Image (cartoon, helix red, strand yellow):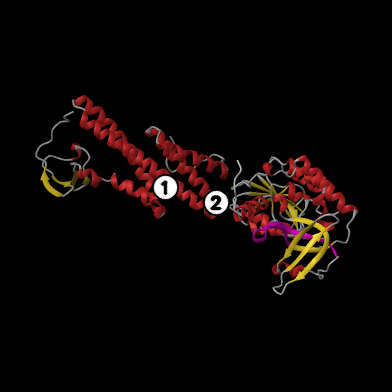
Amino acid sequence: MNRVFNVSDLNSRIRARLTTDLRLSDLWARGELSNVVNHRSGHRYFTLKDGASQISCVLFRGYSGGLDFELENGLNVLVYGDVEFYRPRGQVQILVKAVRRDSGLGGKHLELELLKERLEAEGLFNAERKRPIPAYPACIGVVTSPDGAALRDVLRILGSCPARIVISPAQVQGESAPESIASAVSALQGTADVIIVGRGGGSSEDLSPFNSEVVARAIFRSCCPVVSAVGHETDVTIADFVADVRAPTPSAAAEMVRPDVERLREGLVGIEARMARSLSANLDRRRARFADLGRALSGKRMRGIVSEQRQNVDRIFDRFISAELRRVEALSGRLELAQGKLASLSPLSTLSRGYCIALTERGLARRASEVAAGELLELVFSDGELLCRAIEKKADRR
Amino acid sequence: MTGMTDVASDDLSLEGSLAELERIVRALEEGELTLEESLKAFERGVSLVRRCNALLDGAEQKIEILTGDLPEDLAR
């Protein structure tokens, strides 16, 4: 079908398409600066180009704080940011969050790019295989250096959460770091429900173990979700691409993993109220049914059966009322609805249907045997009370 | 049937308890259970809620380390 768009709709659609592609955000792009404009507003506009192509870039004032050199035409740079579609002009651009001089990391950098491409082609970065962080993990694994600040940050933020925290120590820099990190991730399999893998900030050399293939594969193999937390926000490593969730920093990873205890408590109160309400409604329906049956049937025997069932309901209801409901009632205003239901089951509404309650000096009389001949009784009706005297006691009529 | 005041004694995790609670609430709300079943489900549900609350109340930071010793500043 050929659909006709107006330009705004079309641009919105293109923008939505571009901004939902995770591979087009938090990326690094390399090229030469041209058309650099330092705008009065403090924003900087420039074009990044290589031999064959170019793309517009904008560095907003808020992000230029970290800039340690002047942007000049002809400079080779690496920019970090998100691809964005500027609708008013129908223009694809990079919203730049950081710029670094391209010192030509050369071979090493190229190697990294190749590894990235290879792993991506193999499907290690696929969005479909990303798993959500469990809301209430029983065990949180942390892979990092036992001596680093990252671990302290993570533990501080996790606080006293209702989960075991298991540290799987790893060496996070140096030659043996990749193997160390990979085996620390593997060691948590079967124990942890979610794993935080990371370290604090450092030079790109310090972070390089998180760009290694063994670490990428260990994260990929993990049976439980992995949250990567390497360095600062602008540091993006291969581990971040493979992980189920990328956290900008170790502290942020801990925030993501920590269960929301307050919300859980509220949820539990809600669950209790819903259960009480359902049970109460269920009892209500049955009472009404037995009452109907009682009216519809004649004959002593049938009345006997109905009355038995009815007492059965009453007995269960009494248990329900006595033990739980009082506690549930105390919980909060969330229970108002449930209480409304209960009100309809209270003795008062029974009274209005024509029953009455007999009281002696000792309190409620449930059986004739509890009342002595000649004793005074108070009969409570819905509209008032009668003071009576028991004249004679008769045997059970049934 | 166990008494109303019992706390679920089994070793269910928070996540497991919550999953079971969801099932119980759904079953109760569908209203297909018999009276006795409803009551049993309710009691079980209440004991699970208590278990969850107990797990939350008793939460303290429990740190273990897979190899080696906990650094001194983290051990207690």
- Subunit of label 2: B
Determine the image quadrant of residue A34.
bottom right
Q: Mark 2 or mark 1: which is in front?
A: 1
Between B46 and A111, the one nearer to me in the picture: A111
Q: Which of B33 and A363 is in front in this view?
A: B33
Kind of residue at disc 2: Leu
Q: Main secondary structure of the magenta part?
A: strand
Q: State the separation of the CA atoms marked 2 and 1.
A: 19 Å
Query: Residue A89 in magenta?
Result: yes
- Up/down of A287 relative to A256, above or below: above
Quickly name the residue at label 2: B56
Question: Which portion, as a residue range, is magenta?
Answer: A75-96
- A383 lies left or right of A309: left
- In the rendered image, residue A192, in percent from the top left (x then y), is placed at 67, 44
Q: Is residue A349 above or below residue A105?
A: above
Secondary structure of the residue carrying numbered label 1: helix
The extreme right residue here reads A107
Report the amino acid beneath label 1.
Ala
Q: Do the residues labelled 2 and 1 touch (CB within 8 Å)?
A: no
